[in-house]
Amino acid sequence: MKKLINNPENVVREELEGIAIAHPDLVKVHFEPNYIVRADAPIKGKVGIISGGGSGHEPMHGGFVGMGMLDAACPGAVFTSPTPDQMLEATKAVDGGAGVLHIVKNYTGDVMNFEMAADLARAEGIEVESVVIDDDVAVQDSLYTAGRRGVGSTVLAEKLCGAAAEEGRSLKEVADVCRKVKNWGRSMGMALTSCTVPHVGKPTFDLPEDEMEIGIGIHGEPGRTRMKVKPADEIVEMLMEPIINDIPYKAGDEVLLFVNGMGGTPLIELYIVYRKAYEIATKHGLKVVRNLVGPYITSLEMAGTSITMLKMDEDMLKLWDAPVKTPALRWGV
Amino acid sequence: MQIHRDQIVAWLKAYANLLSEKKEYLTELDAAIGDADHGANMDRGFQAVMKKMDELSNQDIGTIFKTVGMTLLSTVGGAGGPLYATFFLQAGMKATGKMELSLAEWSAALEAAVNGVKMRGKAELGDKTMIDALVPAVQALKTAQENGTSLSEALQQCAHAAEEGMKATIPLVARKGRASYLGERSAGHQDPGATSSYYLLQTAADVWSA
């Protein structure tokens, strides 16, 4: 294992220390329990929004804490769900009296830990709503598994809900925006290489030099198929078709197209992916009206990409364009 | 025959030691069908529990169980954390204020604990989870207790049922947790959660029968 770390045990703590020093104008980092919180939290009368999950997906979620997006993020150990005490303390720290939304990715551990945290927060008199994002179309037998995994749509949900909360909408209204993203967003990813969890020290799975895995999750969960590496355009087709076929996007629909890097793939390749994904969407009569290209929900140093498509309406477009100021996403300010 | 609070503490210590010993093995089981963290997570949680034991001297069994549950909740993470935390929190509610438990009381506490795990994880028998070890164990303990079996014999029957349930997970296809994404590829591997649950009940039988 070759990594820019000191000791595998201290990876998350030292990362958080770095974030605290780098962005004191935007966020504060609380240790034990660990959470990253907006520097100006709690904001009176505003719905608080928190998310969280295992570390190793940076900039998600800590990089999205700030004005117009998350109020707090709870990082767990690498690829391990955070614990309810972190979520409870973060919930209390961001509660401005208007309630708190938990945005949860659909993984067994995340869902259970957030459920317990929501129960504990309600017991302390804080109004909490939870929305579980499950947009990964690679999981086919969702009835016989833990269900579809939460991937790229999570980033978009955090942006749109953050803007809705900033406007002063109620907890139910902000949660409704989140549910819309859950229903209208679909994703699929692929890997060219595996990744190495620091405290494990060896790759999560073996992937030969000339092979790729289509339909992989963000922790190296197995995908739909493994095959020889193909040109980018063919790979993009294999990702886009299941997304487009999964829900009846209609010709004329306006969509946001999000091409994400898994951590080890450079932007030069992501734009090659975007170019083809745009062409396929357009061929199906979809109007790509917004986009996001870059590494926003990663899997350590894994090489690969995921594509997310989200159907947009007028309200969502307005929320997407609203100002945001976080370490990883910033515009309009 | 009763289970005294000191025996509860001895059980938890013995389980913590066993987890340290079996950490690598549990992680290996998890690496095959999950994310290779069950051994490390459980060991971290029960080491934290051990640190709390000193401040619990003379406390009742309900308080001990609730402290164990809250400690696991804040230290384990993953799916195992809330599930084992729920196990001890629910058992604790059946043991509030008690310095010792009869076989019938332990049986009721274990049943409440396992029902809590079922509710929290929404898993059923046959989904290839810790439920596959725990549910048969509860049934065996209830039957033994109703038949008037001695405490040590009843505990052995309970542990034996957990062991059989654990082994029965090997051919199963996982329907819950991260292993479920493997589909058919999850068959042929023993479930790590069922394994740590079997250890818990086998340790109880060994420590309380001695």
Image (cartoon, rainbow, N blue to C red):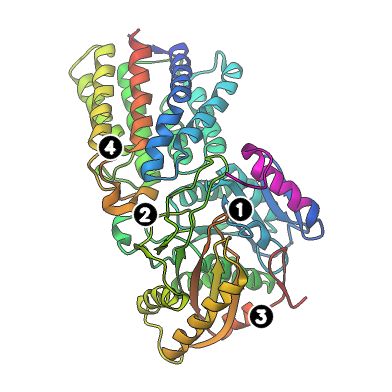
Which label number is shown at residue A146? 2
Between A55 and A37, the residue placed more toward the observer is A55
First in sequence: mark 3 vs mark 1? 1
| Whole-percent x, y for residue A187 in the image | 45, 70
Instruction: Residue under label 3, please give it.
Output: A321
Give amino acid for label 1: Ile
Q: Which residues are the magenta region?
A: A1-20
Instruction: Work out whether B43 lies above or below A54.
Output: above
Real-space Cα distance between discs 3 and 1? 30 Å
Look at the image and tell me in which quarter the N terminus of chain B lies: top left
Instruction: Residue under label 1, please give it.
Output: A126
Q: Are marks 4 and 1 in contact (CB under 8 Å)?
A: no
| Whole-percent x, y for residue A32 in the image | 68, 39
| Whole-percent x, y for residue A75 in the image | 61, 49
Work out whether residue A56 can be spotted. yes
Q: Residue at x 27, y 28 (%)?
A: B162
Q: In which quarter of the image is residue A224?
A: bottom left
Instruction: Work out whether A249 lies above or below A74.
Output: below
Q: Do labels 2 and 3 share a chain?
A: yes
Q: Residues within 10 Å of mark 1 (few under 14, many from 20)?
A: some
Which label number is shown at residue B132? 4
Give amino acid for label 4: Asp
Real-space Cα distance between discs 2 and 1? 29 Å
Mark 3: which secondary structure?
Answer: helix
Mark 1: which secondary structure?
Answer: loop
Chief secondary structure of the magenta portion: helix
Which label number is shown at residue A114? none
